[in-house]
Amino acid sequence: MYNVIYKETFIEGLTDLWKQRKDVVNMLTDAGMELDEGTRVYIYPNVTEFGKMNLLQGYYEGLDLDRIIDYGDLPDPLKYFDYEKFGRDYIATGHDKCIHEMPETGEIVLAF
């Protein structure tokens, strides 16, 4: 189960679609995730090499999510991306996005 907290600080400059909490929740559930009230969702704008509006499936070794305060504190996801382990597969939605659940923490990461 997932607990979703919508972080306004992470959606600056994104389209109106992403400024509505219900749209983010709908996008996640459309991709087959079961969501409960309450897990953090981190949104990374324009950080992947997979194209605009893609969500990175990555691997964040040793990243302490509880200590992250805002977007500026986050490392480049590609630095921790394990291509051999994860390949380039991702969960696609109708909005041409993919989603990653961090393997150790269960946090959900959205990267555009």
Image: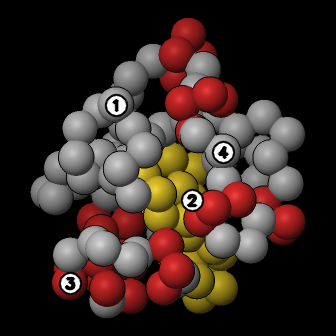
Q: Position of residue 14 (x, y in %)?
A: 28, 72
Which residue matches tag 4? Answer: 75
Q: Earlier in the sequence, mark 2 or mark 3?
A: 3
Looking at the rendered structure, the kind of residue marked 4 is Pro
- Find the distance from the CA under tag 4 to the CA under tag 1: 15 Å
**Which residue in the protein does label 2 denote?**
108
Give the x, y percent position of residue 60.
70, 38
Label 1, secondary structure: give it.
loop
Local crowd size for mark 1, using a 10 Å CA cut-off: few (<14), some (14–19), many (≥20): few
Q: Is residue 45 left or right of residue 105?
A: left
**Looking at the image, do the residues carrying marks 2 and 1 touch, with CB atoms under 8 Å apart?**
no
Secondary structure type for disc 2: strand
User: What is the C-alpha distance between the residues marked 3 and 4?
Assistant: 26 Å
Q: CA distance from mark 3 to mark 1?
A: 23 Å
Q: Which residue is mark 3?
A: 16
Number of marks:
4
Q: Residues within 10 Å of mark 3 (few under 14, many from 20)?
A: few
Question: Which amino acid, by three-letter code, is at mark 3?
Answer: Asp
Q: What amino acid type should be assigned to the residue bearing mark 2?
A: Ile
Give the residue type that dot 1 points to: Glu
Query: What is the x, y in percent for residue 43?
Result: 48, 64
Which residue is found at the position 62% from the left and 28% from the top? 79
